[in-house]
Image (cartoon, rainbow, N blue to C red):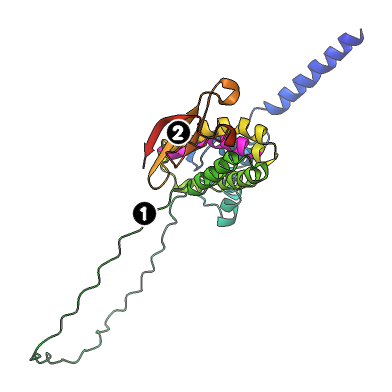
């Protein structure tokens, strides 16, 4: 009997929860609007900002950057909903978020914003007013004698733009060198730098194909960096370095490191004889999984040219 009572109470709670979350919206009106964003986290934030129980909801699609707003037309309207979404940091074609609200978004959610409309001041016309007269200036007399020619300054060549992941790659290579030296404390410090660099990548500096790849691997790279920075046990750090290296190299194939060649090295005896990879800027093998005990074990598997 106690079990039946417990099941009945659980069923009642479930039905109550369903009724609370699935309330129909009376006098429903639906409109499609453009709202800018990046990812699944954006979708949750946009839809949460739009939600008004029994009065308004939104369904935002990342691929089309379009939200279907459904609302009770007697209680609210699309403008009110879009103003709440803008307050959460997301621009629409009707309302622009403040710079402060946009800056508070997570780095992966900081979408490429549409340009602000430029206000052009048009001076009022002044009728029947003649322009001021300009006195005639006689032409300058031609100069005689030798004329010294001055070389025109040449424009400087623009410096190549730094890779959006330059700090991520630099921190990885320092981490790799620390593991080659079997220095757990130094490896943890460089992993901490790597973790911060991953979080600070400017999403708006990535091209569309780069953004797609980075969003696929960002959380995985961040996960391994966080584990490596949290310990000084070199063997545990090396376990996470296996997947960190594979995921980062997948990113490098699309977002190339600057300058020279980059090598994917492989040691068949690492990772419990299952084999493991690492990335290096140096063609000489320096094994981060064994350090001095087997420093040159491994070979170059793949080469990336910038």
Magenta span: 209-226
Label 1 crowding class (10 Å Cα cut-off): few <14, some 14-19, many 20+? few
Label 2 residue SS: strand
Residue at 43 percent across and 48 percent down: it is 163
The picture places residue 108, in percent across and down from the top left corner, at 55, 42
Q: Residue furthest top?
A: 1
| Of 57 and 141, the residue lying toward us | 141
Q: Is residue 63 magenta?
A: no
Residue at (43, 54) in percent of width and height = 115
Front-most of 94 and 189? 189
Q: Secondary structure at mark 1?
A: loop
In the displayed structure, does residue 246 sit left or right of residue 148?
Answer: right
Question: Dividing the picture into quarters, in which one does residue 273 lie?
Answer: top right
Say whether disc 1 or disc 2 marks the residue closer to the N-terminus. 1
| Quadrant location, the N terminus | top right
Residue drawn 25% across the image and 87% down it: 132
Q: State the count of labels.
A: 2
Whether residue 279 is visible, yes or no, is yes
Which residue corresponds to the image point at 58% horizontal and 53% vertical from the top-left?
103
- What percent of the width, then of the height, locates residue 303? 38, 34
What's the mark number on residue 160?
A: 1
Q: Is residue 216 magenta?
A: yes
Disc 1 from disc 2: Cα separation = 25 Å
- Residue 264 tag number: 2
Question: Dot 2, how many residues are within 10 Å of its Cα: few (below 14), some (14-19), or many (20+)?
Answer: some
Q: Position of residue 194 (x, y in %)?
A: 58, 45
Q: Which mark is residue 216?
A: none
Q: Quadrant of residue 282?
A: top left
Q: Main secondary structure of the magenta part?
A: helix
Residue 28 in view (yes/no): no
């Amino acid at each position: 009997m106690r079990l039946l009572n417990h099941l009945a109470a659980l069923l009642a709670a479930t039905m109550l929860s369903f009724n609370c979350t699935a309330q129909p919206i009376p006098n429903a009106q639906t409109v499609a609007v453009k709202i800018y964003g990046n990812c699944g986290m954006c979708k949750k934030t946009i839809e949460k900002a739009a939600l008004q129980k029994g009065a308004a909801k939104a369904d935002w699609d990342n691929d089309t950057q379009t939200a279907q707003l459904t609302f009770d037309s007697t209680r609210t309207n699309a403008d009110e909903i879009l103003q709440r979404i803008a307050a959460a940091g997301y621009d629409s074609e009707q309302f622009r978020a403040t710079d402060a609200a946009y800056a508070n978004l997570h780095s992966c959610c900081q979408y490429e914003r549409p340009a602000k409309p430029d206000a052009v001041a048009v001076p009022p016309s002044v009728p029947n007013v003649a322009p001021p007269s300009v006195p005639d200036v006689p032409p300058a007399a031609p100069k005689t004698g030798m004329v010294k020619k001055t070389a025109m300054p040449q424009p400087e060549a623009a410096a190549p733009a730094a890779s959006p992941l330059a700090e991520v790659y630099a921190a990885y290579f320092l981490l790799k060198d620390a593991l080659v030296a079997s220095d757990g404390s130094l490896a943890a410090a460089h992993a901490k730098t790597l973790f911060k660099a991953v979080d600070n990548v400017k999403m708006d500096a990535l091209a569309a194909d780069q953004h797609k790849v980075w969003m696929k691997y960002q959380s995985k790279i961040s996960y391994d960096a966080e584990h490596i920075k949290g310990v000084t046990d070199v063997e545990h750090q090396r376990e996470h370095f296996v997947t960190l290296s594979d995921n980062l190299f997948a990113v490098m194939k699309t977002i190339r490191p600057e300058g020279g060649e980059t090598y994917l090295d492989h040691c068949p005896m690492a990772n419990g004889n299952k084999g493991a990879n690492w990335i290096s800027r140096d063609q000489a093998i320096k094994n981060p999984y064994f350090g001095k005990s087997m420093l040159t074990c491994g070979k170059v598997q793949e080469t990336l040219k910038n």
